[in-house]
Image: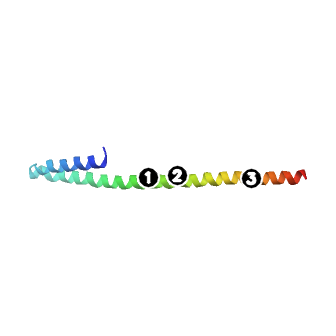
């Protein structure tokens, strides 16, 4: 279920709860509000995790770039050393 679907269903639930007798309504409204708050907290957590994953991906790309540059540099320097050794 996507975000819009969740919000729609939650609003439908709140409307249904509003039509109940007062004695039953308070507890269900409390549970619905708690569900909404947990959903918001979960959404923030997932967003934070997504940001962390994006940062990790970027960091890995930089590390791979650096690794490749280091390998090329090592090969170049070895070649120079071999040429000096052969001379």
Which residue is painted at 53% across and 54% down in the image? 58
Does 2 sit above or below residue 52? above
Residue 33 in the image: state x and y as whole percent: 23, 54
User: Along the horizontal axis of the image, is 52 left or right of 37?
Assistant: right
Which residue is painted at 48% across and 52% down in the image? 53
Element under disc 1: helix
- Residue position for label 1: 50
Residue 75 in the image: state x and y as whole percent: 75, 50
Q: Which of 55 and 45 is in front in this view?
A: 55
Which residue is painted at 66% across and 51% down in the image? 68
- Residue position for label 2: 57
Element under disc 3: helix
Count of marks, rendered view: 3
Sequence-wise first label, 1 or 3: 1
| Alpha carbon separation for disc pair 2 and 1 | 10 Å
Q: Which of 79 and 22 is in front in this view?
A: 79
User: Along the horizontal axis of the image, is 69 left or right of 59?
Assistant: right
Quadrant of the drawing holding the N terminus: top left
Residue 46 in the image: state x and y as whole percent: 39, 52
Residue 74 in the image: state x and y as whole percent: 74, 53
Q: Residue 74 carries which label?
A: 3
User: Along the horizontal axis of the image, is 64 left or right of 85?
Assistant: left
| Colour style of the rendered protein structure | rainbow
Element under disc 2: helix
Q: Tell us which disc is closer to us: 1 or 3.
A: 3
Furthest residue toward top: 1
């Amino acid at each position: 279920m996507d975000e819009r679907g969740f919000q729609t269903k939650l609003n439908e639930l709140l409307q249904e709860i509003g039509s109940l007798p007062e004695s039953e309504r308070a507890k269900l409204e409390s549970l619905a509000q708690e569900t909404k708050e947990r959903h918001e907290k979960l959404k923030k957590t997932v967003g934070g995790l997504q940001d962390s994953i994006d940062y990790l991906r970027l960091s890995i790309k930089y590390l791979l770039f650096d690794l490749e540059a280091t390998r090329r540099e090592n090969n170049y320097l070895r070649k120079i050393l071999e040429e000096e050794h052969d001379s």
